Image (tube, rainbow, N blue to C red):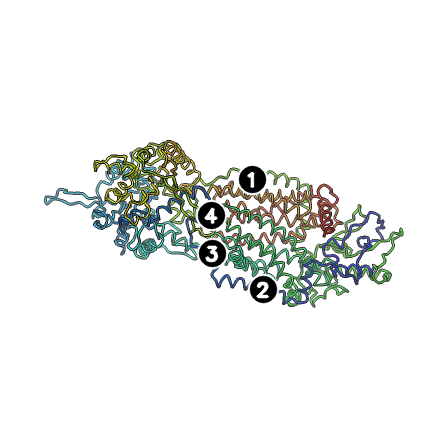
Amino acid sequence: AGANTAAIRDQARRGGMRNEGDALASTPEDAEVDAGDVVGEVVKQPKDAPSRDEPPSMGWLARYCRHCERNPWTGFLSVFFTVLVMAVVVGAFGLARFDTENDKEWVILEDEVTSRTDAAEAALKLRDRSIGKVAGAAILPREKESEGATLMFQFESIVDGRSVFNRESILLMKEISDLVMNTPGYADVCQLAYDGEGENATSLGCVRPVSPLNYFFPTVTTHPNGTVANVTHDGNGVDLVTDIDAVVRSFDADRRGMGYFLDGGFDPKTLHNRMTRLKYPVGAPLRGFADNSRDEEKQENKVGKLWLNAVEKALFERFGMSAGFLSSPYLGIPSERDTEVRWYAAYLRRQDSRLIINYDLAWAFASILSVWGYMAFSTGSVFIASLGMFEILMSLPVSIFIYKLVFRIAYLGNIQVLSIFIVLGIGADDVFVFYDAFKQSALVPHVKDNILDRVTYTAERASKAISVTSFTTMMAFLATAMSKVMPISAFGILSATMVFFLFVVNVAFFPPALMLYDRYVGKMCTCARLVGDKAANAEVPGSRPASADGSPTSTATLADAALNDTARRIHAWESSQPPAPKAAPGKAPKAAKNGRGRRVTVNPFALRGSYAADGSDGSDDSSIDDAESGTKNFVMDKKRLRPVEWFYREPFFRFIKSPARYAILIAFVALLLYGAWGANKLEPPAQQEQWYPSDHMMQAFANKREAFASSDEDRVIVVDVFWGLDGMDVSRVNRWKPAERGELRLTETFDASSPEAQTHLAGACDDLAAATCDAPGCEGGTLLRNGAAARVICPMRDFAKYQSALNRTFPAAKESFAREMYEFLSSKHGKFLRKHVGFEAANADGSVPKMFYYRVTADSSLNYPAVARTARPVFERWESVVDGINAKAPAGVNRAFSTGYWSWTWMKTQEALVQNTVQGLLLCFVMAFVVLVLSTADLRAGFLATVAIAGTVTTVMGVGVHGIMGWDLGIGESIAAVILIGLSVDYCVHLANAYVEAPAWMTTRERRTQHALMIMGISITASAVTTVISGSILWLCILKFFSKFAFLITATIASSFLWSVFFLPAALVTFGPLPDDRWSNLKPAFNAIGARLTCRR
């Protein structure tokens, strides 16, 4: 028996038995053993057992581990410096520099709506083809309003039933207005009014602010006798009017012109008006810029330096506003005299947003530090925790190296910063699985005595476990990479690359690191002590020496806790046996005979996992007899388990196998159904997504914007109808470069010169004005704001008036149309229409160039901004109206299209996010099931694990997102819906694989489930805590996107943990597969396929 034991040990050490089940063969059916003759498990000695001199069969991972044993520093430093060099290259060449935000990056390049929008913008930017440039009709400095730099205010009464138009609130408005207009620089940036045209135009000074103060503080001039001579509503008066109510009534009387000052709840009887607003128009283009639409950000930055920054600083001082630690001064809304004051400018929001993003990213360092601390606490080793954190941190720069230099992807956006928060949990899970496998390897009999065998066992067991989870997570991210929305696709590719890197570097880094850990670190410190008497730690052959205080010299684990006790029992058993017969060279040792003359081999090393000798030493464990196999299996002294391991193995498992499991299954199935119902209710947002918390001034301003009555000063979605353009050619465009939009395509058949075409284009404007719209987004039931009185810029109609004034006919003759239209646009009457009719560059011979596009501009009745649910019906109505116009159009002008620019393209983006969610979920579920079935080689186990994943997803999306938080399917939810599959698969895969790969002698569902919980429960718990820690840090961020993601990550991990630890074990105990399940077990089929492939080779 002793020789047989040595043979088994030697065979395992030399690579013949690498898997946990190899040294533990099932009891042969023909073995009959008396219980009194059995100390260990009875196994049949293989006839073809390799001899001591036979070369072992080693896989590549075993060979790598052997190399690391001989040269641990070489292996460790090779990986370390390879990773470090790649990171240095990324830093040195600026590959990690994030791209500047571009409003084009979120639009779908290949979409027809985007193609139309880009074509319209490209046509308008062709200055060399524009008649305006040829005629010297450049826009005058600051004659247009800058949408990004214009400063707006809201004043709201915070006293219920009190109108904001009271004396104290109006005086407060006046003080704020004086502060704004008296800040140096306003005269240099304000929008200018002009008298005259072109070079002869004369500036009349700043455009008057849009403010109710113009009417509350009018300038009054009087006659010498004291009577009023003139009243100018300019807001420059000294005294407040005595009759405030009369002014408010005048606002109500002219809703179109002055409804801007009234909120939607204005009561004309009581004159109660809770809120009002003011606007200080800033001009564009600034001097030195040719157009207000070009270099907008540069112009806004210049306005900031000249005026807006100083105004912001003065307002902060006026209301005592300051930023807290890693916070924004805009968090909190100032109030004075029972009146809240809010202000907004797109430039100020952008500046504050950049500050907030930098602050929020600073929390990433806190998250990293927290995860490192917990890893050090959980593993009991600063070395292992630091090694794991090094891998996680290096995953970003190394993945960027591959992402940019190998995949040739140029785009790197802010959203990809989220990847680091996600891989913190994934990387920590990989570290825990590796390290726990290494610690537990000290108990596995055939590997425990040799560091090479332990590291090889660890690498093979852990690499298989994390390969399955890593592959499934990668597939989830790659499903996200299939999105039409470029930043989402880039996020998926980079995240998948990071997960792949973590897997590769773990497999390559940990074998030499564990060799060094065992050789140096493990012998220098003791991170935990055994609980037990000194006798249990007595030195025996094969055991590890104990320290002076009785604690083991290595870190205490599930394995170390029973190692000395196991070795002592085996030594005592070997000493009581008769000398083993000597084996001939090249032959296996002879086996002993039992009482019935049957030849058997007694294998005391059939202990598996945490199973040691029975409880004869006084422990409260008892051995468990296997009636089917006739063997007595060893159980472990529970006192030597770590608390978490003991908890999962004992009280928790007893709860799971009790009748309570049926209640667990019913409850979780009900949760799955309810979650699926809630997830099905998710839709795109009905309102604009919030990017800031509600108490952030910019967000509060945006939320209150819709509370005001409609007026001509409100911003609505402007829609252009184009003729002559045919989209963009994007065949040569690099989709990862948002600035590249393709080449403009023109409609070859476009010709507006015929009399029929001219008449049609003039009539098209009337068709638009008369169009009705019953969509919820259309105010007043008309397609255009103000219906028949809508503002429609119609060049052909104005051209007809011009022709009439010159006593010319309209429509013009086909031969003279181009010349007369060119002449009209060059005159003062056509000045503002020069960008509505596009001519090619002037010909060298002075002839009239060709007209290549024509457009009509109209104000739609859809307010800006609009979400997809609101914009879609209005968009479809526009498409229908334009299709009707094309249907009755003559040849040459029958291919018109409409574009709402960003509003239309963003609508398509929102819809694509929903489609990406559905497609991604379907793909991920299919991939998860396939991977689980292949990894477990069992249909039933794969199906149960897939149900757990489905339960996790539906719980998060249906119960968490829809039921608890009440959110819609926005950007964050769309991303999380797919990637949470990758996060949720880890835990159930670990448990399902541990169940299926349990030792062969564990022939009952109870034993297999207990085994899986005990060896993987601690890793799952540690990983869950780590991911929750990394995700919870995001709660401290200011941007709603990050805090929303914090909920999604923590909810995903909590849900995945509950489904994996409660539902899956209960399902495995009740329905789990057994080794002899023929219909479920796929191992025979896989073995047959493998054998056939091997034979062919």
Residue 1060 locus on image (x, y percent) = 62, 46
Q: Are marks 4 and 2 in contact (CB under 8 Å)?
A: no
Q: Which mark is residue 80?
A: 2
Quarter of the picture containing the N terminus is bottom right
Q: Earlier in the sequence, mark 1 or mark 2?
A: 2
Q: Residue at x 51, y 64 (%)?
A: 88
- Identify residue type, mark 4: Ser
Q: Are marks 4 and 1 in contact (CB under 8 Å)?
A: no
* Secondary structure of residue under mark 3: helix
Q: Earlier in the sequence, mark 4 or mark 1?
A: 1
Q: Which mark is residue 675?
A: 1
Residue 536 locus on image (x, y percent) = 74, 61
Toward the viewer: 303 or 554? 303
* Secondary structure of residue under mark 2: helix
Image quadrant assignment for residue 672: top right
Q: Residues within 10 Å of mark 2 (few under 14, many from 20)?
A: some
Numbered disc in front, either 4 or 1: 4
Q: Which residue is mark 3?
A: 361
Q: CA distance from mark 3 to mark 4?
A: 37 Å
Q: Is residue 28 left or right of residue 106?
A: right
- Identify residue type, mark 1: Gly
Q: Which mark is residue 84?
A: none
